[in-house]
Image (spheres, coloured by chain):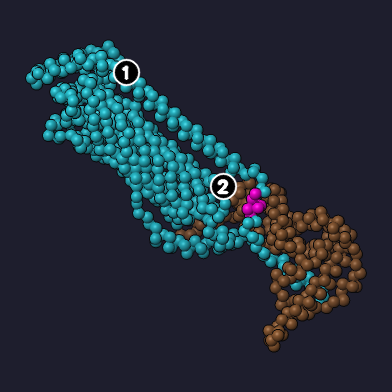
Chain colours: A cyan, B brown
Amino acid sequence: MESNELDNLFKNALAEHEFPPQEKMWKKIEGRLPNKNKGIVLSWFNFGIAAAFMGAIVMATLIFLFQKNNSEQKFAQQKIENKSNEIAQNKAIINDSNKKQIATISSEKKVVKKRNSENFIAPKRIKNTNATIQLNLASNTNNSIPSTNENLKSKNLIPVAIAANNSLGLALSLKTKLPLVGNSDVEFNRTMHRKVNDDVFISDLLRRQLYFVKGFHIGIKTEFGNSWISASVPASGILNIKMRYVINASLAYGFTAGYDFNNKYGVQIEYHIVNQNVQLSEVSSNSTLQNSNLRMNYNHIPLLFKIKWHPLRGIESKPLVMNYVLGVQYGWLRSSSAPNIDYTLIPNEINVKKPVYLDEWNAIMAISYDVYINQFFFLTFGGRAAFGGDLQKYTSNDLAITKSKNLTLGLEFGLHCKLPFWQKYSLH
Amino acid sequence: MDTSHQILPELDEIVDGCIKGQRKFQELLYRNFAGKMFAVCMRYSYSREDAEDMLQEGFLKAFNSIEKFRGDGSFEGWLRRIFVNTSIEMFRKNSKMYPLTELNQSVANNQVVSNDIVSNMSANEMMQMIQKLSPGYRVAFNLYAIEGFTHKEIGDMMGISEGTSKSQVARARMLLQRMIEEHSKKKLSSENAALYGK
């Protein structure tokens, strides 16, 4: 054998020969790589943003609750001072006939208007409250047990209660899973094996690590939360009405549909059916504490913009995507009821079943994580804050209530499915 | 189903990710080229442990200097050159342990091996034979026979003269031929033993 032949034999056999190293080798190399990785720096930056965001929410909540407690304390003091006078006045009114009551109401209206002209505090909110006055009169006949009319009064306060809803969402939905996955796996495998360029061939190992980053996805979600409200019926004259809100939860279920432009940005629209069970504690000028239980069914449609970030993980790990979400939400009351109200005693002009329809809006900020199960399915969990208020004033029977504002904090969970068409693969 | 929009990550994207220091792309690059580069390391080393050290050093150098890859040639070629240079550096660090002497060229060419014997050998068997060479012979033979460098280039890289490079390669050939002969004899005797029984 000539020297060149020997050289060529070795060259042909070994020049392109592959000899796979042990799996632990990457870990060793990774351990020696410098930490100039932008992802690590970015992670602290992101966690800082997240901490600031959550801190702002907590601070806003504390400030809000502090202010609310202060106003309630002032009101309680005022209530004690006027207690004896009010009881005497109410008893006198109760003994009068209806005509006399109306006459009294008219005179009281004049007093209210006069006071309103003198005192700018809540003058517009109580223009004419015939129904509410009647409720007050009736409730005074029995101060110890809240009557149905007392509960009815809460109905008049539903506009405020709407914004004070405590919402808890829980959603389940079906997926278009089977046909999509079945068809796409074939295409997925075939496409993954095409040659990337002259040097790189995507191997089976890498194929399993690729995930959709662009395209449509649908899903379901559940949301758990509670709301606080900043508005109430103002206190004035004998019509001092104040509400306190008890934290309560409700259930909702909803669907989501979204489109990811790439692995950084995406949009998502949702549809929630929120079933709220709100407990209200009302305190009126006659010192009665009245409890009401309202069931309200809302529809919410949030439109969200997502900024996605992917904490660095090993290729063999499933992607973990952190979403910073901004958005707006439109909502409307679908139906409502007051289960502990005797409807036979309710005046005709007040419809308890549909006491009010108020549209509301919210701005949404959220942070959520997407945890991938495989290329097609991922779970979402995170926190969401929504703040906003009613779009218009509620007026009924000349009762005007200012637009309410609300803050909602919640936890959300979801299951999503990536639709395997118009998709782009990547490692995330 | 429309799959025309499906796009795979390109090598350019992987390299860009490595330049940005993104670990996932570094891992992707590693997993794409580790097999080939480890084979290079095995050829230049005398043991698997030695090759693993070389593999670590090579990839660390590659990640640290990947910004210098200009993209005007094959990336694999650029990466392979890093590993070859790493192998030579490690050889030069230990060169005091490997005294190189110029041998008589005629001594190296007096062995003849049949092509049939060599062609029946596997790549792994050839790899093991190269690993059995002394460090100087092994590096010089790899550079000349497999990488295709000239003796002058090899001399510059290894810090030896051109003549020493030639003699190192020639000596490596001679030793490889001996090993091939021994290998063929062992294989033949084992085949006979299997055929006729012990």
Marks 2, 1 in one chain: yes
Q: Residue at x 27, y 11 (%)?
A: A118
Report the mark closest to the observer, 2 or 1: 1
> Please, is residue A142 above or below residue B72 in the view?
above
A198 or A405, which is in the foreground?
Answer: A405
Q: Residue at x 24, y 30 (%)?
A: A291
Task: Say if mark 2 contacts mark 1, CB within 8 Å.
Answer: no
- The kind of residue tagged 2 is Leu
Identify the residue under disc 1. A74
- Percent position (x, y) of residue B23? 61, 49
B99 or A187, which is in the foreground?
Answer: B99
| Res A159 seen here | no
- Percent position (x, y) of residue A260? 47, 48
- Percent position (x, y) of residue A40? 59, 42
> Please, is residue A415 above or below residue A243 in the view?
below
What residue occupies the far bottom of the structure in this picture?
B196
Label 2 to label 1: alpha-carbon separation: 53 Å
Q: What is the chain identity of the residue bearing mark 1?
A: A
Identify the residue under disc 2. A312
Number of numbered labels in the structure image: 2
A303 or A272, which is in the foreground?
Answer: A272
- The kind of residue tagged 1 is Lys
Q: Quadrant of residue A383?
A: top left
Q: Callout 2: 10 Å neighbours few (<14), some, many (20+)?
A: many
Say whether disc 2 or disc 1 marks the residue closer to the N-terminus.
Answer: 1
Q: Callout 1: 10 Å neighbours few (<14), some, many (20+)?
A: few
- Percent position (x, y) of residue B97? 84, 58
Q: Residue at x 28, y 26 (%)?
A: A243
Question: Which span of residues is magenta-colored?
Answer: A26-31
Q: Is residue A27 magenta?
A: yes
